[in-house]
């Protein structure tokens, strides 16, 4: 990262600044933005450019429209929120490429902000298509990538586009902040270094667990994905979440010499179904009977995880410990959140990432005092695993400029 061009190296001089932001924010059922972290996180870069009296052109993806125009994924609906958070009116372009949109970018006055329509309305985005990237590149004179949350994707507005800005593709403030902080904290972490991984689907996390295990001193596992591991040990899990096609991989991980670093929840809060009124009981995880499913880590597991986190110097957490959206199953996730805040307040390093984990922190009103809440989900995991992020690697090198 330190060899990459940053916002502070760019020559603004009235240039149109094309900024790739990550405005992929969750909406509620009325189509209103219910979580603003990602928009807020991009404000320092936008304000900086406005301060330099340059026009700002923002581009982002939003949802998964799969290369077609789908109104429910129009970025138009977030315009009022961006205006409110930015404290100024912005303009909106009905597309992200084309001569009319380019004319709009050229008509911008110093400090004006224009948001382009969803880049994923075009199939070229996900294909990292150079021709689509060339069209996008016409919208700016210099390029800034501030979308840390999307930096692991090799897509046109992140990767192919930088070819058209060989000496002026720079990292924005948020990107710099994330990479500097995460690099310092995680590349050579203060030990004990503990990973906490949860969430429903083991399929989306097993590669992470695979690569994280050699790097951490302990790995605490919770959420639905714990049950495939429990099953892989030959134990019963009742009707808990289970992904049969990941069983062999889970077995392989558990048979490694360092598998003793993995800690699974000894007990679970289980229910017969997801209804609020349904009966709940705590079982040893290996004894959850048929007809019952584990929906949260149990009291003993909670105490064990709190103790492990308390003794750590660096903790990285991604994924809820249970079905936290329903209060009866929120205790495990809340306990981890509190232990992480506690760690932060003792000057140790607590790093949290991922959309669901962030949503949990907001629900518990516990997001204020964490050492670092990353805007990355997939990108954070890939960074942690030591992978190069295509969106960073593609930025201009300082020494070449
Ligand atoms: P993921 O997208 O895989 O990170 O999953 C996040 C979702 O998993 C959240 O909505 C949680 O409520 C849900 N979740 C976590 N643990 C469980 C569990 N034991 N059973 C069902 N859902 C769970």
Image (spheres, grey):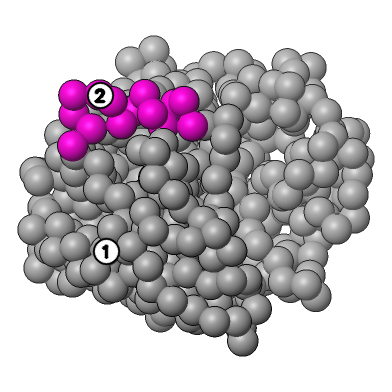
The quadrant holding residue 14 is: top right
Work out whether 121 lies above or below 342: above
Taking depth in this image into account, of 193 and 300 the one nearest to the observer is 300
Quarter of the figure that contains the C terminus:
top left
> Is residue 250 in the magenta section?
yes
Residue 254 spot, x, y in % from top left: 31, 31
Residue 354 in view, yes or no:
no
Q: Which residue corresponds to the image point at 66% horizontal and 31% vertical from the top-left? A: 157
- Identify the residue position indicated by label 1 in the image: 301
Relative image position of residue 378 (x, y in whole percent): 50, 40
Query: Residue farthest to the top?
Result: 400
Dominant SS of magenta comes to helix
| Mark 1 Cα-neighbour bin, 10 Å: few <14, some 14–19, many ≥20 | many
Q: Is mark 2 on a helix, strand or loop?
A: loop
Tell me the residue at 18%/29% (across/down). Answer: 258
Per the rendering, the mark at residue 222 is none
User: What stretch of residues is rendered in magenta?
Assistant: 247-260
In the displayed orientation, state which residue is furthest to the bottom: 277
What residue is pinned by disc 2? 256
């Amino acid at each position: 990262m330190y060899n990459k061009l940053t916002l502070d190296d760019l020559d603004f001089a009235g240039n149109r600044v094309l900024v790739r932001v990550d405005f992929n924010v969750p909406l509620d059922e009325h189509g209103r933005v219910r979580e603003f972290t990602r928009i807020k996180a991009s404000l320092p870069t936008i304000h900086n450019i406005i301060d330099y009296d340059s026009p700002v052109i923002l581009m982002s993806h939003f949802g998964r429209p799969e290369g077609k125009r789908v109104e429910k994924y129009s970025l138009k609906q977030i315009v009022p929120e961006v205006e409110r958070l930015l404290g100024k009116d912005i303009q909106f372009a009905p597309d992200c490429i084309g001569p009319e949109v380019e004319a709009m970018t050229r008509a911008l006055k110093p400090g004006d902000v224009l948001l382009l329509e969803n880049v994923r309305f075009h199939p070229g985005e996900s294909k990292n298509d150079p021709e689509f990237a060339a069209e996008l590149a016409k919208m700016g004179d210099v390029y800034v990538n501030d979308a840390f949350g999307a930096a692991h994707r090799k897509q046109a507005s992140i990767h192919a586009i930088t070819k058209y800005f060989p000496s002026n593709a720079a990292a924005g403030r948020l990107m710099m902040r994330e990479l500097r902080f995460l690099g310092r904290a995680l590349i050579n972490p203060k030990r004990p270094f503990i990973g906490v991984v949860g969430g429903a689907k083991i399929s989306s996390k097993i590669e992470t667990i695979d690569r994280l295990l050699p790097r951490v001193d302990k790995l605490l596992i919770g959420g639905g994905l714990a049950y495939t591991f429990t099953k892989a040990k030959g134990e019963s899990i009742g009707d808990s979440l289970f992904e049969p096609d990941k069983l062999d991989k889970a077995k392989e991980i558990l048979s490694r010499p360092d598998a003793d670093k993995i800690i699974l929840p000894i007990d679970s809060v289980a229910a017969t179904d997801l209804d609020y009124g349904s009966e709940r009981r705590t079982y040893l995880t290996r004894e959850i009977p048929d007809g019952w499913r584990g929906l949260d880590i149990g009291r003993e597991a909670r105490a064990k995880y709190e103790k492990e986190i308390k003794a750590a110097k660096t903790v990285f957490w991604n994924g809820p410990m249970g079905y936290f959206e329903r209060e009866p199953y929120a205790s495990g996730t809340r306990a981890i959140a509190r232990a992480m805040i506690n760690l932060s307040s003792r000057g140790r390093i607590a790093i949290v990432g991922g959309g669901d984990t962030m949503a949990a922190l907001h629900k518990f009103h516990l997001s204020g005092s964490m050492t670092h809440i990353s805007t990355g989900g997939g990108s954070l995991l890939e960074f942690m695993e030591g992978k190069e992020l295509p969106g960073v690697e593609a930025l201009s090198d300082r020494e070449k400029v």
